Amino acid sequence: MNRTVLYLALAGIAVVLQTVFLPVLLQGYYKPDLLLILVIYLGLHEKPLRGGLLVYLIGWCCDGVAGVFPGLNGFVLIGIFMVVRGIVARINTESSSLLLLLVVAGTVLQSVLVAFALDFFSQTARIWPQIVWQLPVQVLLNLTAAFVLLRLVVWLQRTFMPRRDLPGLRKLDRRYEP
């Protein structure tokens, strides 16, 4: 129960950062998707039922705060979560490079799912060209945000909780040390 509350708090912080603070810092349409990074982390380290319900709830909450189409983020995030859960048994979930690789793949999958959903339900708009045009910049922003967050979490763990194991960060990578 404590982890669920922690994940919901992190999702709330991510939504506030994405909708309030990042638009002030980064002008234009491009913002890193912090919820995507959280969903990939949940996909790597939570059980399917608990994590799936949590991710779907996070998606609906994000739609309630900053979404235009109700359910779109819930659909997209649960799709990403299920894909990550599908490959968890075959990979080393302790690898920090895997997290970065999954952020890139998750960004591409997120773009495909958003374009599919919007194109499927729209009669006139062509969404694919707009999303394909924005994809390289979005991948770079998400990858940079994941790298910075990974370094920050490793530094926080070493500084404030040196003996505590965080899921996915038990085997700390020396490349992310300050």
Image (cartoon, rainbow, N blue to C red):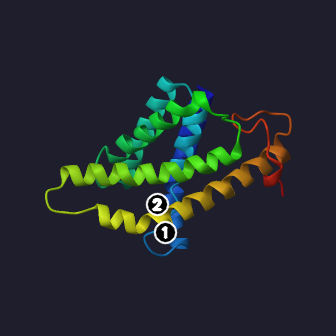
Q: Give the image quarter of residue 166.
A: top right
Compared to residue 29, the image places residue 161 above or below, namely: above
* Picture residue at 77% right of the left edge, 33% below the top: 165
For label 1, the SS is: helix
Residues 40 and 165: in front is: 40
The residue that disc 2 covers is 19
Q: Position of residue 41 (x, y in %)?
A: 59, 40
Residues 5 and 84: in front is: 84
The residue that disc 1 covers is 23
Direction from residue 119 to residue 83 in the image, left or right:
right
* Picture residue at 52% right of the left edge, 60% below the top: 139
Which quadrant, please, contains the C terminus? bottom right
The amino acid on which the numbered mark 1 sits, given as a three-letter code, is Pro
For this orientation, the residue located farthest to the left is 123
Mark yes or no: residue 35 visible: no
CA neighbours of label 2 inside 10 A, class few (<14), some (14 to 19), many (20+): some
* Picture residue at 73% right of the left edge, 54% below the top: 152
Compared to residue 168, the image places residue 114 above or below, namely: below
For label 2, the SS is: helix
Q: Are marks 1 and 2 in contact (CB under 8 Å)?
A: yes
* Picture residue at 14% right of the left edge, 62% below the top: 124
Compared to residue 65, the image places residue 166 above or below, namely: above
**What distance separates the C-alpha of mark 1 from that of mark 2?**
7 Å
Which quadrant, please, contains the N terminus? top right
For this orientation, the residue located farthest to the front is 90
Q: Position of residue 115 (x, y in %)?
A: 31, 55
Q: Position of residue 89 (x, y in %)?
A: 59, 27
For this orientation, the residue located farthest to the bottom is 27
The amino acid on which the numbered mark 2 sits, given as a three-letter code, is Thr
